[in-house]
Image (spheres, grey):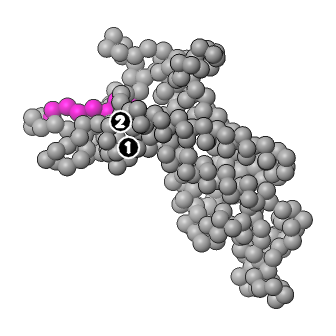
Amino acid sequence: MTPVSEEAGSGTTRKGRLIYRHGIMTRLTHWAWAVALFFLLLSGLQIFNAHPTLYIGAQSGFAFDNSVLKMDAIYGPDGKPQGRTTVLGHSFDTSGMFGMSGPAENPSYRGFPAWATIPSYQDLATGRVVHFFFAWVLAFTLLVWLASAIATRRLRRDLLPSGRELRHIPRDIADHARLRFRHDGRYNVLQKLSYGGVLFVLFPLVILTGLSMSPTMNAAWPFVLDLFGGRQTARTLHFACMLALVLFFVVHLLMVLLAGPLNELRSIITGRYRTRDDALATEAVSGDPRS
């Protein structure tokens, strides 16, 4: 698709061309993932609160010393309760956030605070219903996106970095550190690697580890549970994937703010993106509609 100038018939403006960057399928799946991940995160923390401890191995309990993360409440040296988080044997006072949260006069003893879970009160059954529903939304959206990306060749065009791009990773890291961003409508190599990591590593891993904790799936596909070394290890990996996705989301939002939030937001809502280098923009999108 040919780049569109800001004003019809006026040619290129000083602000750069307004190009068609994201097709309808990209925009729909982007927002479907955003909604699904929001509800998956908060409902997942609700489920975690039912037993706020993570283990490595196939079993857990009082007879085992294999926990890697634990959130609970204890009585401190002053005789008052305090929240405690233990990571790999190292304990930290996390009162007000993890282990114990809420008002001081009426604290709540739970892993994550009420504002971080769906529903806000402790309700494992509702949390599981919400979590499972949006897990299927995530998985179905991933399949739809993958089929579309293969059919439109977007997978190779936009997400597979070339050898030349890989050699320029140090330069791109340095440019980002100096807050120097390219506005030509194309993904840079760091974007390709991060998006590819989410789509082809984190999403499949979070889906498979989630399935491995289902008794029904254990009966149908026992090899999936064996693949992750047991239910408890799968649960820990599931939690680690969640942390990685949250980190990606934070960095993603930060980059959007630094690169120009209005322009970036417009591109993922309407598909239109304003470039700052018309020559590169023309090369990137002329005759190459985004899907």
Which residue does the numbered mark 1 point to in the structure image? 119
Q: Quadrant of residue 67?
A: top left
Q: Looking at numbered disc 1 in the image, what kind of residue is underneath it?
A: Pro
Callout 2–callout 1 Cβ contact below 8 Å: yes
Q: In front here: 172 or 231?
A: 231
Residue 133 image offset from top left, x and y in percent: 54, 38
- Mark 2 closeness class: few <14, some 14–19, many ≥20 residues within 10 Å: some
Quarter of the image that includes the N terminus: bottom right
Q: Looking at numbered disc 2 in the image, what kind of residue is underneath it?
A: Asp
Which residue does the numbered mark 2 point to in the structure image? 123
Residue 87 image offset from top left, x and y in percent: 37, 31
Residue at 36 percent of width and 28 percent of height: 51
Q: Is 72 part of what is drawn in magenta?
A: yes
Q: Secondary structure at mark 1?
A: loop
Quarter of the image that includes the C terminus: bottom right
Q: Does 201 appear above or below 105?
A: above
- Magenta segment boundaries in residue numbering: 68-76
